[in-house]
Image (tube, rainbow, N blue to C red):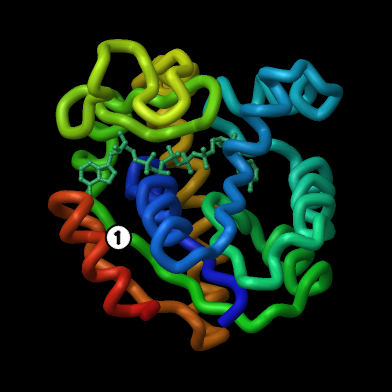
Amino acid sequence: MKRLILFGAPGSGKGTMGDLIQRDFHLVKISTGDILRSAIQQDTAEGRRARAFMESGGLVPDKLVIELVRLRLSRGDLNGGYVMDGYPRTLAQAQALSLIASDSEKAVFIEVMEAEAVARLLSRLTCSDCGAIYNQLTKPPQKDGICDICRGRVVRRTDDTEEAVRQRFRVYAERTMPVIEYYGRKNVLARVDGGGAAAQVYLRIKGLIA
Ligand code: AP5
């Protein structure tokens, strides 16, 4: 397998699991959410186009995201394999992905109850510089407001409001569930129980991909 795709609702733990997989399996993590947030921070044309969609909990238009992914996959640093977090999210993105890079692939669907995922998101903290993921309740940074890894500022994401989170769930059910079913029909999809502590979920995922 060259490409591992992580699927799951907002707050299911895709980013957290992607970081652990990247560390232990030496895969490069590609998160479209991180790419878009960095474009917003750098105030690029793509970032300016994406901003309002992201803050309201909607999807950024396919054309823009597909182009960003095409550019990322062409960088030449993925020979050892890569893990995708947050892409593809629509059928058009899935079809584009197989045209851009027809790599051998596996997909893991992290299943979690909506109430648990919402509670996680409403207590999530993120480093505004390196994107490291924290949680006020379960994984606070060692020093309040400061990233353990890069000393950057740890903040709440602007789309982690109750209203935007609910909208992200609606969009996920409508636009991304059909993509997960599509990977199921391709026979490359495994499901994993995403409930419980992050270390336990990671052990389950490791068992599927090792
Ligand atoms: P994105 O950043 O991808 O957001 P998301 O899919 O909503 O997912 P999240 O990052 O909210 O959650 P996650 O599953 O990664 O959970 P995490 O590990 O952080 O996208 C943001 C926006 O960008 C989208 O809404 C859209 O606008 C745009 N976008 C991105 N990609 C796009 C695309 N392909 N097409 C169009 N638009 C796109 O964990 C959450 C919290 O829970 C953390 O605090 C963590 O510490 C904690 N946690 C994790 N696992 C556990 C556990 N097992 N137990 C307890 N706590 C846990």
Q: Is mark 1 within 8 Å of ligand 1?
A: no
Q: With 149 as the anchor, is 178 left or right in this view? A: right
Q: Position of residue 21 (x, y in %)?
A: 41, 61
Q: Amino acid at mark 1?
A: Glu
Q: With 186 as the anchor, is 110 left or right in this view? A: left
Query: Considering only vertical position in the picture, is 196 above or below 136?
Result: below
Which one is nearer the viewer's eye here, 149 or 201?
149
Mark 1 crowd level (few <14, some 14–19, many ≥20, 10 Å Cα) = some
Q: Position of residue 155 (x, y in %)?
A: 41, 15
Q: With 210 as the anchor, is 34 left or right in this view? A: right
Question: At x 48% / y 48%, what residue is drawn?
Answer: 172
Q: Position of residue 61 (x, y in %)?
A: 75, 40
**Which residue in the protein does label 1 denote?**
111
Q: Position of residue 64 (x, y in %)?
A: 81, 41
**Farthest bottom residue?**
187
Image quadrant in which you'd find residue 137: top left
Image quadrant in which you'd find residue 58: top right
